[in-house]
Amino acid sequence: MASTTTSSSAAPTVPDAVIKQRVRQSVTTEDWLIRGLIVLAGLWLLVIIFLPLYSIIYRSLTDKAGNLIWFANYATYFQNPALYGSLYNSIFIATVSTIISVLIGFLFSYAVTRTAMVGKPIFRRIVMLPLYMPSLIHAIALIYLFGNQGFVTKGFFGYFRENWGFDPSFDIGLYGPIGIIIGEVLFCFPQAIIILIVALSLTDARLYEASTALRASRIRTFFTVTVPSIKYGLISAAFVCFTLAFTDFGIPKVVGGDFNVLATDIYKQVIGQQNFQMGATVSILLLVPTVIAFAVDRIVQRRQMSLVNARAVPLHPQPNPLLDGVMLLFCMIITLIVLAMLGTAIFASLVNVWPYDFTLTLKHYDFGRVGGGGFNAYWNSVRMSAYTAVFGTVILFFSAYLIEKGKQLQWTRSIIYFISILPVALPGMVIGLAYIFFFNQPSWDMAGLTIPNPFNVLYGTMTILVIANIVHYYTVPFLTATTALKQMDPEFESVSASMSVPFYKTFWRVTLPVCLPAVLEIAMYYFVSAMVTVSAVIFLYAPSLKLASVAVVNMDDAGDTAAAAAMSVFIIVTSIGVRVLYELVTWGITRQTQAWKKR
């Protein structure tokens, strides 16, 4: 009996061992390939993020001769009241702008998600228009409305005085903190709306039914149910708005006047005084608060718990004439302000001489009459944005796939994930200046050896502009990609592995088609963001590669504000056109590739 048992149990051992060995050999080949790709993704992020950051930090600790002086530059900065005052100004502007932006964003989001008012889709689309505008367009529009020769400042040029007998003119003191705050609020509040609409949409109606059953008042329900359920959304919205307002360059550059902030200080130190060491020092000071805000946001988000489960009941707002009417009026005011800003910029680009001759003309669209690069700058921006969209999407989505679906090198993937979400805390001007220090360095002196910099050939080319934009806007599309990949059942990879299907075939035939809407959204986001950016490229463009957004800055500096408005109109029309094209393509492709969802 014993021999029989032994022989029967030993019989399958040989074929099992052979099978396991063959599977192990097959998996090992693919496993090493995936490991290599993960390491390559890590090296890519090391070169485009960590090494440039190290370069700018190191430069802030050296003198002009390259000697290490540690924190002497920081001591010099804080000993100069004219310099360290900019740090206080930046924090003040960002804080006030954040409070107002989040408040407006919350009220607007509440109106379109928790009330039964009419016109919600129209309001949501109009209020998103600022996302397709350079930040400078807000400042330019403010000049035409509230500047020294503005519509409002001049009382609508006497129209009301002549026809109605009263003069509504008043001067808000645009050039300074007031103008910057107004511009930053117009620039930031759509970002808050995007986050808060999602937060307010994810709720369980049973919580409100329980509150009603307990006879709680609307105010009590608001503070005990609504606010706690969206507190993490409020924190995220505040983080985004603070970062944008704190690091923005365009609006303070145009309407800041003598009110200095850190972003304009960097520009003055680098472009005006060629003081790269102090420029690096100010850049680090610009970086620190955003990193702190980023860290706080990540810590808070880890505590977030899901408020919606499988038994959740969707909340359907009930009509409330008073609340619906008040919110409708509020949304109308906000959308009218957005349209007024856009309309003012467009109108100013079409009149002959503001404010003396309002004859319509297209002469300001003849960019050959002014400096800035003309139509070549516009087409350079289109090319740069297209390259950013294509290469950024391919690199980012495949990297996200390796991190999310890969099983190898867990610690390495965790580090890559952290690096991938870090760029959201990096101001564009810091990235641009860091790239100067890293890519413009011909060689490195290490331990008495001179090592040529193999990346120096990229400096002054379209490639470095594309890489800078990919890095600057890396985090949002990366999180979009990982979210889409997490929604896919791991069984796809498990079944493919059991059938010995290579991972790249599964990626091409299954993962990519299912995630195609997210891929297209990433490409659209990259294109529009690269089209409107100023801060990330203001230090990097070569004379032969002038860009449209930078041309707007240069035209405004030269006093050609109408031409700057005209170039901004080109940027806006292009960005909105790409968005419309994205919607059409997504609609068509979704019908073909997402048909399985309807089965």
Image (tube, helix red, strand yellow):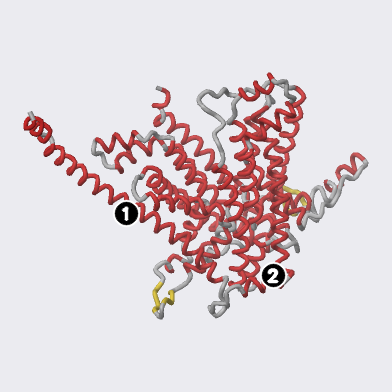
Badge 1: how crowded within 10 Å, few (<14), some, or many (20+)?
few
Closer to the chain start, of discs 1 and 2, is 1
Image: 289 above or below 127: below
Q: Amino acid at mark 1?
A: Gly
- The residue labelled by disc 2 is 78
- The residue labelled by disc 1 is 36
Q: Nearer the viewer, residue 140 or 354?
A: 140
Q: Nearer the viewer, residue 169 or 334?
A: 334
Image: 115 above or below 444: above
Q: Quadrant of the N terminus?
A: top left
Q: Nearer the viewer, residue 479 or 186?
A: 479
Disc 1 element: helix
Q: Amino acid at mark 2?
A: Phe
Name, please, the residue furthest toward the front: 2
Residue at coordinates 71% horizontally, 40% vertically from top-left? 104
Q: Measured from the top left, where is residue 16 in percent x and y?
A: 15, 37
Q: Is residue 403 left or right of residue 195?
A: left
Q: Measured from the top left, where is residue 213 in percent x and y?
A: 68, 19
